[in-house]
Image: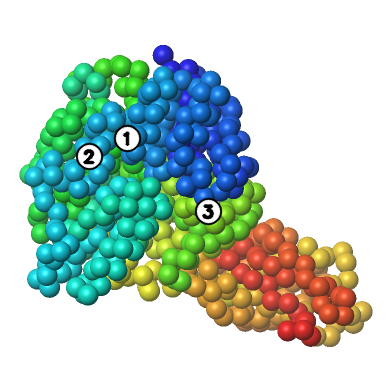
Amino acid sequence: MITSVLVANRGEIACRVFRTCRDLGISTVAVYSDADAGALHVREADAAVRLPGAAPSETYLRGDLIVAAALAAGADAVHPGYGFLSENAGFARAVIDAGLVWIGPPPAAIEAMASKTRAKELLGIAPLDPARVTEANLPVLVKAAAGGGGRGMRIVRELADLPKELESASAEAASAFGDGEVFVEPYVEDGRHVEVQLLCDAHGTVWALGTRDCSLQRRHQKVIEEAPAPGLPAALEASLLDTAVRAAKAVGYVGAGTVEFLVADGRAHFLEMNTRLQVEHPVTEEVYGVDLVALQLAVAEGEKLPPETPAPRGHAIEARLYAEDPARGWAPQTGALHLFDVPGGIRLDTGYASGDAIGVHYDPMIAKLTVHAPTRDGAARKLARALERTRIHGPVTNRDLLVASLRHPEYAAVEALDTGFYDRNLPALTTAPGGEELAAVAAALAAASARRGRFGGGWRNLRSQDETRTYGGTGGGADGGTDRDHEVRYRPTRDGGYEVTAPEGVRVVAAAPDRVSLETAGVVRHFDVTAYADVKACADGTAYADGTVHVGGHRLAARPRFTDPRE
């Protein structure tokens, strides 16, 4: 019986595995790089072992150090999570050879299916020979034989570009996965990414836990996933499930795994088998009412699965919240996550908490938010609203993009769902939401309320000019706001309130340092306001407070009232 599990991973998935272990009464061990010394997964574990260094090649890809950590901490089992060494047969063997329980498939199955080239050969699918690719084969896709997540992947549309893209993809794959093997396959434009979740025990039982659709992707990395995959013809869905089960049985698969397909023109093209737990496994758990990590542990202990696959119910959708700017080439963002607060009633999987820092060393995913509802439309509506109500104070995120995606007509119309969604719709999806000017008014009045009791700037014994404050969007659209500045003018009233003189048509209902209520056109709206001051020194020795202000879902920058002579 397993009593202590080391998770050979970091962040969200480590926290996810720890949660199930705690529920089952199993103690937990974390490993961490120097960059992760204060990370949430380290804080949540019962014990933690340092892996010196920061780069993955020095830390989370060092199987020898991880096995040594497990033995030193007294763990009797290792869960690989996803990414890093999760599909490395050599690491699985090292764990087993050390007398530890490997919570994953047999090393031989990993070798047969984790390499995409071998998996295709097993299913009778031959990859393209790079030396024989012609103009007629274009476009083609260069892919890493190991790993995933878009790393080591290149679309080639010009024959002359193939050699350099092969070299570039190989170098990236070697850095990310420790394996530089790449291969070439036909590139199917804008198909649907559909996958089948498998769970197999060591006694011959194979569960095919339905389908997932992961078509909304950027740079070959998934953004929004759902289960079941909507709108599939019954015969096609049955074919996908049958192919996945046959693949698992062909290699004597044990544990959790996923078979991925690209569906286009009513046909399914095999992509790969992931011999690990997928990032998007929560949507399957929600639909089937199971805990896949708990089942992984049970299978690793030799237990039998029930002969009948659980019955599905309803629909689940997951959104990946990233610290990135979609309007600026999906550029990763870093910095302090001052506040991270998700409303109740939805599932949250995360490796961060308020006060943590988002660094430069690893994937910028902050969290996964998952909802379940009786229908797809209901799940999309529920998730969009939950994301709107989530408070994220810190770096720019893709939160507003996720909301806009879930409410987009193409997403609602299943027949338009494919991997080209963001290529077609990104400009519209990254347009900053309306209401930024009114948010600037709320920011100005909250700041004024915070200063009340002190002589504020521009104070006179007799009323003269209005107070003026300027706030600007932080740029980039969507979560970053616009690039516009909004000048707000207001004056205190004798009853202790405020009168807004610019913009026009705004009545102040209430104003406090953290909450402002404003009426426009007969409608009262409430704004939660949080300011993070950045005190800057001027050349003459004086100082002014600048910084970021979060007003509801808007992220504003407070402009300095006075210009620094050095600038």
Q: Estimate the x, y position of residue 138 in percent, counting from the top left.
A: 15, 69
Residues 74 and 291: in front is: 74
Asked where in the image residue 251 lies, by quadrant, the reply is: top left
Instruction: Tell me which residue sits at (53%, 68%) in the image.
Output: 480
Query: Is residue 203 in view?
Result: yes
Q: Residues within 10 Å of mark 2 (few under 14, many from 20)?
A: many
Residues 236 and 156: in front is: 156
Instruction: Tell me which residue sits at (15%, 64%) in the image.
Output: 131
**Residue at the spot of label 2:** 113
Query: Mark 1 or mark 3, which is nearer to you?
Result: 1
- Report the amino acid beneath label 1: Ala
Q: Are marks 3 and 2 in contact (CB under 8 Å)?
A: no
Q: Residue furthest right?
A: 461
* Label 3 residue SS: loop
User: What is the total number of numbered labels drawn onto the structure image?
Assistant: 3
**Residue at the spot of label 1:** 89
